[in-house]
Amino acid sequence: MDLHTIDSVTTPRTRSDLADLCATDGLMAGGTWLMSEPQPHLRRIVDLSGMDWPDLTITEAGLDIAATCSISSLVAATHPAEWAATSVFRQAAQALLASFKIWQNATVGGNICLGFPAGAMISMASALEAELLVWRADGTDLRCSTAEFVTGIAQTILRPGDVLRSIRLPAAALRQRTVLRKMAMSPLGRSGAVVIGRATPTGILVSVTAATDVPYVIATDSVEPMTVLEQVYSAIPTDAYYSDPHGEAGWRRQITGVLTRAVVAELAEIA
């Protein structure tokens, strides 16, 4: 896509180089979405690849993922053997309406910043209770959950000048078993519902995305499919399910129930 309104492209190297960001700047890491459609409101592209953030950093606290880390780098990396939940990285990536070629450039942070209901990295980050680090335009830092970060369909807490710096996945969550199930109205269509279950010491944590306008993360106190489903349905308002060409709201709610029961049953089988 030719972005004919762009006057300049800059490559910042340090945080101070980001001080003059404004609403007409387009932040680019992979650029797969940025270059996919007209951006008439933009006047400058700011290429974050020059920040040279390490893609992945393993610490005692867990895994730090740079916002500029490509999806393919996350999927292909070698992680500690005890981190059972890392299998969900590839499963979430495969839920994208995109080929493996897009994985080479599309970034974890970019996918989250779009705030789309079917954002695959939003699904992954929600299920693993990620902590997002946002560099605010005023020089302060903000840490929040994925559910706090995404506020609506294609809406986030980011303000002009803000930058998503990294995504931290806690070690405790990474050590727990996960199961992902998705449903789309056509074999190659966008996900209509994505449900990820994670076995915790007290029950099953359920993440629901794609079916709802924002991510929902429900920590249940049960491992019984019907009990977990009741708690999930109780936690998600009926009007949170939305309709678009990829599925009606009622269908999305029904499929969420089917997938939730399947996820809980499978976690019980592999316990």
Image (tube, rainbow, N blue to C red):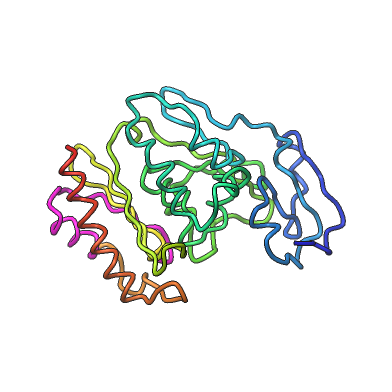
Q: Nearer the viewer, residue 198 or 192?
A: 192
Find the magenta span and give its range: 212-234
Q: Position of residue 48 (x, y in %)?
A: 70, 42
Q: Is residue 238 above or below residue 133?
A: below
| Total tally of numbered discs in the picture | 0
Q: Nearer the viewer, residue 17 or 54?
A: 54
Judge whether residue 230 is colored magenta.
yes
Q: Nearer the viewer, residue 233 or 17?
A: 233
Q: Is residue 168 above or below residue 222?
A: above
Judge whether residue 77 is colored magenta.
no
Q: Position of residue 94 (x, y in %)?
A: 45, 50
Q: Quadrant of residue 243?
A: bottom left
Q: Quadrant of the N terminus?
A: bottom right
Q: Position of residue 214 (x, y in %)?
A: 43, 62
Q: Position of residue 189 (x, y in %)?
A: 46, 65
Could you tell whether 246 is left or right of 31 in the image?
left
Q: Is residue 44 above or below residue 76?
A: below
